[in-house]
Each structure stands twice: as structure tokens, then as C-alpha cells.
Image (cartoon, rainbow, N blue to C red):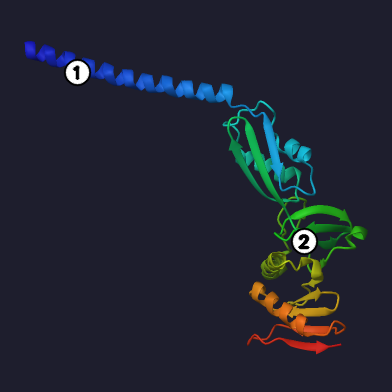
Amino acid sequence: MARRRHSNRKRRRGSFGFLYKVLSMLVICGAIVAALTLFFRVNTIVVTGQERYTQDQIIEASGVGMDDNLFLLNKYAVAGNIRTALPYVDEIRINRKLPDTLLIEIKECGTPMAVVQDGFAWLVSPSGRVVEQLDAAQAEGYAVISGCTLLAPSVGTRLALATEYAAQQQSLLDLMAALEAAGLTEQVQAIRLDDLSMLVMEYAGRFSVELPYGADYERKLRALVQVVEQLETNQTGTIQMTWDNGEVHFIEN
């Protein structure tokens, strides 16, 4: 009986010890959360990488206010707020710098191209996002994407072509991305998708470049640059890059 009573007392002490540890952990966690909430408040917001937008515009779009808790901020929601309000923002990185600074690093999109439709010019970034709606007359100065129809265009949404151009859509996006990566977007005056056997790019104000759909456009553009460098500065014509064997043919005007 004595041994049994002693065993019961040990079990009770063990149970109380476990509960004490749990309660201690909860108190410590509560103290940490309280400290984070009380002391780590946003006092400074630093924005870098902006060109089109001002720092004040980006801070306002972020929805972050001074004295907001630095650790309770949802970085993904902040990034979403900025993209929704400022569509030319292409990439966003948000970091915390203790004790009170929020760092917002952005990258704005490159030069957009225009799709003219129903009296409007819809500007599409190299990453395929509709960034602005203008009157059709304001499309001058932008490379024009023609021979296709945008499906329910709206600023801030991804480019989507009508169903019959689904195959051409991915090729267009790939070509635009390759042009941006190669720094050649400014050399393009137009991209035409009206021929379902190939797309045609008006390039450097002198050439019509015929390209196949679904190609490796980074490789094609490297070949294009090499061909143009070998031509005289007064030569104009068609550069055919649709041959299956990879050959490039130049037909002078």
C-alpha cells in the first residue's frame, strides 16, 4: 500500500511537471509575440529600382502604414497591392530590416508593345501583361502586334488571344521575352500573326523577318543579329528564318 501511494504521488508530480513546462512555454511564446508586436513597428520604408513610378506612389500602393507591425505584414499581399495599382511593376522583392525598416525592391517592365483593337491601344509588357489602355491614336511610337484579337483585355491581366490563336499566343510571348532578354525590343516596329504558317517581325526599320511558330527564339535572334551585321547599312529586304535546316536566307528589296 505504501509503495502504491508513493507511486501515485510520483505520477501526480510528473503530470504537474509536464503541465508546468507547457504553461511556461506558452508564457514565453506569448511574451515573444507581445515584444514583436510592441517594438518592431514600421518606421522607414525604402524603395529601390523604380523609374516610372515615384517612391511615394509605391508606398501608397503597398498599403503599408507607419507603425504597422513589421512581422505581421503579409509580404505577398503587399506585393499584390503594388502590382494591382501599378501594372508597370514586373518584379517585387520585399524584405524586413530590423528593427523598423521595410525594404521594397522593384523591377519595372521593359518597353511594351501595342495591340490596337476596338478603338483602343492595349500596351503589353515583354512578360505578357497588359499594362495600360490608350486611345488607338496614341499607339504611335510603339511596336504594334497585329493579326490577332485580345480576349477580354483589362489592365493588369495576362495577355490572352482569342481561342483560334492559342498556338500563336505562346510563340508571341516567347518571342517578346527573348527580344527583351537580348535588348532588341526597341529594334522592333511590328509583329504580325495573320499568317498561321509563320509570324513576321518588322525589324530595324529595314527588314521583314519571317520566323516559325514554336521556335527557339533566343537562338533565332542571335542568328538574326549576325546576319544584319553582315549586310550593308542601306540594304533592305526579307530575312527568312523558317527553314527546317536552320539556314537563313536574305531576299533584298
Percent of width and height locating residue 157: 72, 52
The residue shown at (70%, 56%) is 158
Q: Which mark is residue 242?
A: none
The quarter holding residue 110 reads bottom right
The residue shown at (74%, 83%) is 227
Percent of width and height locating residue 129: 72, 56
Q: Name the residue tied to disc 1.
A: 11
Q: Is residue 21 visible?
A: yes
Label 1: state its secondary structure.
Answer: helix
Q: Is residue 211 visible?
A: no
Badge 1 density bin: few <14, some 14–19, many ≥20, Cα 10 Å: few
The quarter holding residue 69 reads top right
Percent of width and height locating residue 200: 77, 76
Image height of 119 relative to 44, above or below:
below
- Specify whether 242 is left or right of 25: right
Q: Which mark is residue 150?
A: 2
Q: Amino acid at mark 1?
A: Arg
Q: Nearer the viewer, mark 2 or mark 1?
A: 1
Percent of width and height locating residue 26: 41, 22
